[in-house]
Image (tube, rainbow, N blue to C red):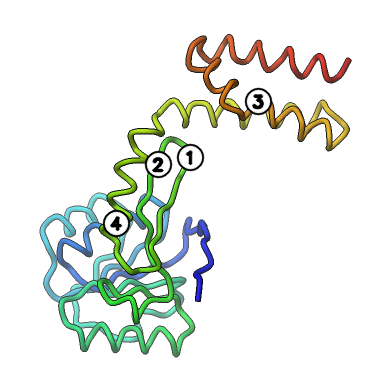
């Protein structure tokens, strides 16, 4: 069955990574970048992971796994090299109704972590239903060549002009039509060729024309 794609707000919410190796490091980095309140549980912890927790607000628990560490979590990631333990973590999460991802075992995943192209506020996520993450990574590299930092800068300007449209253009149909022109390829090319200041002037002219 097809999965439901979603961008999840994790700011300040408890997330748990079980495992202390290189994979756990990558998962922890991504969760911290999303603003999650991270808890790492492992008996043996990679030096990089130790440093990551020390440099952030992450809680590092040097201990054998216990179901009690999952309490209050929104999601958990099992990143140990013990398949039996990973299976137990998944079972515990099901009982507690906590979303769980067991690394490298799609059968034991409530969600998959996509490959992501990030350019400022723009995020493009690529998923393969867990079938082949390497292919998602390959596609990410191709998209990284197409979508540049300019796209992120353009999005930031679009956010500002969208606020102005909401405040200054009363008719929803007119706002939709204007936004359609402002987000198209021609508008983006104008932004790249002339810079943010000139593009703002261009956008202002379109808004003024619509008001008139």
Task: Pick whichever of labels 1 and 3 is earlier in the sequence.
Answer: 1
Viewer-nearest residue: 152 or 177: 177
In the rendered structure, which disc, 2 or 4, sits on the residue that comes first in sequence? 2
Front one among 98 and 68:
98
**Residue wearing tag 4:** 135
Q: Is disc 4 surrounded by few (<14), some (14 to 19) or many (20+) residues within 10 Å? A: some
Q: Which residue is mark 2?
A: 118
Q: Is tag 1's residue or tag 4's residue first in the polypeptide sequence? A: 1
Spot occupied by residue 50 in the image (x, y as percentages of width and height): 17, 59
Mark 1 Cα within 10 Å, few/some/many (few <14, many 20+)?
A: some
First-in-chain label (4 vs 3): 4
- As measured in the structure, the alpha-carbon distance from the residue carrying label 4 to the one carrying label 3 is 33 Å
Q: Which of the numbered marks, if any, corresponds to residue 122? A: 1
Q: Nearer the viewer, residue 73 or 93?
A: 93
Residue 179: image quadrant is top right
Question: Which disc, if any, is residue 182?
Answer: 3
Per the model, the C-alpha gap separating discs 3 and 2 is: 21 Å
Label 2 sits on a secondary structure element that is strand
Q: Are marks 1 and 2 in contact (CB under 8 Å)?
A: yes
């Amino acid at each position: 069955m097809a999965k439901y794609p979603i961008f999840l707000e994790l700011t300040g919410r408890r997330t748990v990574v079980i495992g202390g190796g290189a994979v756990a490091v990558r998962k922890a980095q991504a969760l911290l970048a999303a603003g999650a309140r991270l808890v790492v549980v492992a008996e043996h912890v990679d030096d990089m992971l130790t440093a990551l927790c020390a440099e952030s607000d992450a809680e590092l628990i040097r201990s054998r796994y216990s179901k009690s560490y999952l309490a209050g979590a929104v999601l958990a990631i099992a990143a140990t090299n013990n398949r039996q333990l990973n299976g137990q973590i998944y079972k515990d999460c099901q009982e507690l109704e906590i979303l769980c991802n067991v690394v490298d075992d799609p059968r034991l995943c409530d969600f998959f972590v996509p490959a992501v192209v990030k350019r400022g506020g723009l995020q493009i996520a690529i998923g393969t239903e867990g079938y082949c993450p390497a292919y998602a990574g390959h596609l990410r590299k191709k998209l990284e060549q197409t979508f540049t930092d300019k796209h992120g800068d353009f999005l930031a300007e679009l956010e500002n002009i969208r606020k102005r449209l909401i405040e200054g253009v009363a008719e929803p149909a007119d706002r939709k039509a204007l936004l359609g022109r402002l987000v198209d390829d021609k508008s983006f090319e104008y932004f790249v060729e002339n810079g943010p200041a000139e593009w703002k002037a261009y956008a202002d002219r379109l808004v003024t024309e619509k008001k008139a």
